Every structure is written in structure tokens, then in C-alpha cells.
Image (cartoon, rainbow, N blue to C red):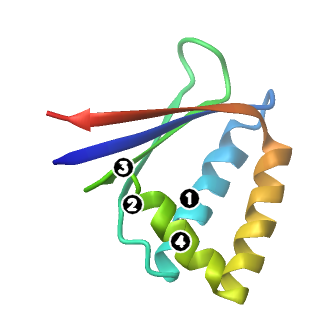
Amino acid sequence: MAFVERRTFFGKVGGGHALIKHILEGNAAMARYGMDIKARVLSDYNSGRTDRVVVEWETEGPGQIDEAIGKVMDDPQGRGEMTAWLDKLNELVHYAEPEHWEIQ
């Protein structure tokens, strides 16, 4: 059974492009530390709230992303890189909303 973890980020006004770039960099960093999870980054500039960016990670189980993040954080270099990444993410967004979907 497959799952999708979807996170909608609500970026600061005018920051959509920077947010997309930063999310792509974060996905690449996670891949360098062994996270082998299919990811999609979606942007919507024509409807709804501006500077909204959605990330979807397709997994085999609901805890797979937490497990992958745990492995990265166990590596001192990975922890440093991801901590800096999260700090910058916090500067780019107002908030985010997570969703967890089971693919039928």
C-alpha cells in the first residue's frame, strides 16, 4: 500500500520562487543522505492564495519520511545541514499544513 505525505507551505508574499528553490534543495539534500522517496513540488500562481507551494512525498508507509529524517539527523553533518535548511525555511514561510493520504 502506498501513501502520500503532502505539505502545503504558505510563503511570504513574493517569496514563491525562493521557496520552490529551497524545497528542491532540501529534497536533494535528503537524497544525498539516502532518502529514496519520490517527491513532487507543485506551485499555484493563478488561483487561491499567492506564494503557496505544495510538496508531495510518495512512500510505502506512513512512517517512512520520519524514519528517513531520523537517519539524516543521526549523521552530524546531515543534522547540521538540515538544521540550517529548516532555519531558512522558517524565514520563507508563514506556516504549513500537512496531510497524509492513503493511495487506493
Is disc 1 placed on a helix, strand or loop? helix
Query: Which amino acid, by three-letter code, is at mark 2?
Result: Gln
Distance from Cα at disc 4 to Cα at disc 2: 13 Å
The quarter of the displayed image where residue 56 is located: top left
Distance from Cα at disc 1 to Cα at disc 3: 22 Å
Q: Position of residue 55 (x, y in %)?
A: 49, 43
Mark 1 and mark 3 lie on one chain; the one further toward the N terminus is 1
How many numbered callouts?
A: 4
Residue 4, numbered label = none
Residue 62, numbered label = 3
Mark 4 and mark 2 lie on one chain; the one further toward the N terminus is 4
Query: Which amino acid, by three-letter code, is at mark 4?
Result: Met
Which residue is label 2 attached to? 64
In contact (CB < 8 Å): disc 3 and disc 2: yes
Is disc 4 placed on a helix, strand or loop? helix
User: How busy is the neighbourhood of tag 3: few (under 14 within 10 Å), some, or many (20 plus)?
Assistant: some
The quarter of the displayed image where residue 65 is located: bottom left
Mark 1 and mark 2 lie on one chain; the one further toward the N terminus is 1
Q: Residue at left 51%, top 81%?
A: 32
Distance from Cα at disc 1 to Cα at disc 2: 19 Å
In contact (CB < 8 Å): disc 1 and disc 3: no
Query: Which amino acid, by three-letter code, is at mark 3?
Result: Pro
